Image (cartoon, rainbow, N blue to C red):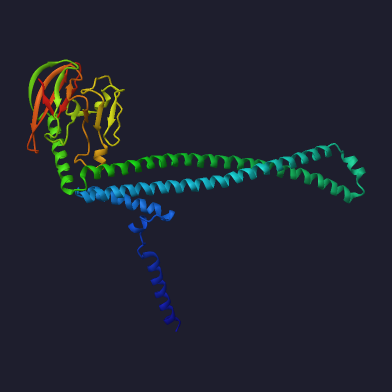
Amino acid sequence: MQKKLFLPIIGVLILFLTLVFFSPIRAVSLEECEKEDLAPDKIGECIDLFSNKVSELGEQKKTLSSQIAQFNSQIQLTQLKISDAQATINKLEKEIGVLGFRIDYINESVDTLERLLKERIVATYQQSFVSNLELLIASRDFSDLVLRLQYIKHIQENDKKVLASLQETKSNYSNQKEEREVKQAQIEEVKKKLDSNVALLATQKSEKEAFLKVTKNDEARYQQLLAQTKAEFEAIQAIIAGGGVETQVGQVNQGQKIATIIQGASCNSFGAHLHFTVTKPGGITDNPLSYLKGGVSYEDDSGGDPFNPSGNWEWPINPPIKFNQGYGVTAAIRSGVVWYSFHNGIDISSSSSSEVRAVKSGTFYRGTYSGNGGCALRYVRVDHEDSDLDTLYLHVNYLL
């Protein structure tokens, strides 16, 4: 009978353990993560969820809808990081408040312990002047003498306890202060991340608006943009690698007029602009802003790319400079309106003149490149005589 009862109990236990340890854990859903009243303990899971979603969208074929979805996911991810940082700050501030209360309490305890210790020390000091003979005379009997001696011993023991307690309290006070300072430093660090994410959120929203403005929410236009920027990128890479058809014209001086910017659309370009690139041997490019002079008046039309010229070269076009796109990973790249992932020059234009000048003296070459775009991209190149640098000027008409 007992054996028959035992077997069903074992079965129930196995079923229970299976449900507890092997049942799938319910992950947070996308709908939950998009709620405004998201529980703080779910923020970390939602950050992971949207991080994965952004990565997945980035690997998909570029379409207008997928790019907009990636924008939305990036914005949602940044908003979650802001919420997480704010929750962390609130938690740390509460903990600092508790530590402040403890520190005040310890302060009061230290004052009390110091007062008690002083009283004990005075009493012990006064008692130390009473000789054993005087103590014996002052006692009514032997029992009274023993009580007096025990009292003195008790006072001395209490002194030691109070002293040890005081030292422990001071140690706790120091620890609490250090912990508060650590948490305060953590708050400052999280605030920096919060400020960074707030700025990033504003940038992401701005990039999304710029993307919708450029594409006009039209798939065909978006694909045309991608195709055109791909053709331009491949053409520029080929030119840098020496694949262009060039003719040596002669020597030019710094500041000499060498070309004009093509007005309107041209080969691999939607509008008038100069693509200016600095190259080193081996087909390596460098940031032109590291060579061009600072302090020039300009209008930022790049969406927020860094504009920090720090060199001594004169600009190839007249100011004020219209700064269309910077060097490296630009706002246009982040917004998805271009095909490439790295911009190897800067795009600039001028409202006052279409003239292009040599930034340094050197040997002048006139060139073209015909690639996948079905057109000939015109450019000029100057091989600088005082260094191993070359400068390229693209989307231009020849003057020489």
In this view, the residue in front, 116 or 138, is 116
Q: Is 107 placed above or below 363 here?
A: below
Percent position (x, y) of residue 26? 36, 62
Relative side of 305 to 172, left or right:
left
Taking the view exactly as shown, the residue that stands out farthest to the bottom is 1
Q: Residue at x 24, y 20 (%)?
A: 314
Q: Residue at x 13, y 38 (%)?
A: 231
Percent position (x, y) of residue 193? 41, 41
Q: Is 110 placed above or below 360 here?
A: below
In this view, the residue in front, 154 or 234, is 234
- Residue 29 at least partly seen: no
User: Which quadrant of the rendered structure holds the C terminus?
Assistant: top left
Residue 340, by quadrant, is: top left
Percent position (x, y) of residue 214? 22, 42
Residue 386, by quadrant, is: top left
- Residue 363 at least partly seen: yes
Marks counted in the figure total 0
In this view, the residue in front, 224 or 298, is 298
Percent position (x, y) of residue 311? 28, 21
Q: Residue at x 46, y 47 (%)?
A: 88
Q: Residue at x 24, y 39 (%)?
A: 332
